[in-house]
Image (cartoon, rainbow, N blue to C red):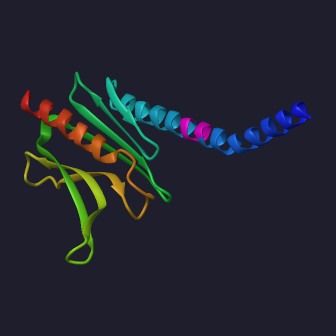
Amino acid sequence: MNLGTAITGAIFIAIFMLPFIFMLNGRKKKEKQLLQSILNIANNHHCKITKQEISEEFAIGLDETRNQLFFLKNTTDKEIKQHINLAEIKSCKVVKTGHADGNKDNSYKSIDKLDLHFSFLNKNHPDISLVFYDADENFGLNGEIQLIEKWANIVNDRLKNL
């Protein structure tokens, strides 16, 4: 009787775990594809990524020798590829767009969008924003605030040394 209960319990645990295993494998496959894609983009620009960050939705990488930044984001309907030469950049900052919810006594601010915004030295060149998070495309924040601040610091440190 105990052996039958143990086997039944093991089967239920296995059935419960399968969706999580499939989800984890799918996420790892997607991250691997993003990494390979951003490495290919850098290679097309004769660069080699020495520092990168891969998430479920996007990949960002930097060629520290050539000061070239690469960004790739897959949305439901398109793929966004960006290449930025940091020698042409004047400033980089994090832009948080949001709105307040609730009433006067009990309100909180929701983040709708997180952008890494670049201004160019050449005023004729339009600014570029790399979208790390968009509430219309993502269910919720999953570490994007920390990632965008980390990359803003990396880029600003590079800009100081140019």
Residues rendered magenta in the picture: 24-28
Rendered view: 113 above or below 56: below
| Residue at x 38%, y 28% (from the top left corner) | 43
Visible in this render: residue 46?
A: no
Please state if 25 lies on the left or on the right of 18 as rendered: left
User: Of 15 and 70, which appears nearest the observer?
Assistant: 15
| Residue at far right of view | 1
Q: Is the magenta stretch mostly helix, strand or loop?
A: helix
Q: Horizontal and vertical percent for residue 161? A: 8, 27
In the rendered image, the vertical position of residue 50 relative to residue 24, given as above or below: above
Is 154 contained in the magenta span? no
Query: Image quarter for residue 87?
Result: top left
User: In screen coordinates, is 127 left or right of 114?
Assistant: left
Q: Quadrant of residue 69?
A: top left
Q: Nearer the viewer, residue 100 or 79?
A: 100
Q: In this view, does 152 lie above or below 97?
A: above
> Which residue is drawn at the image coordinates 87% and 32% (left, top)?
2
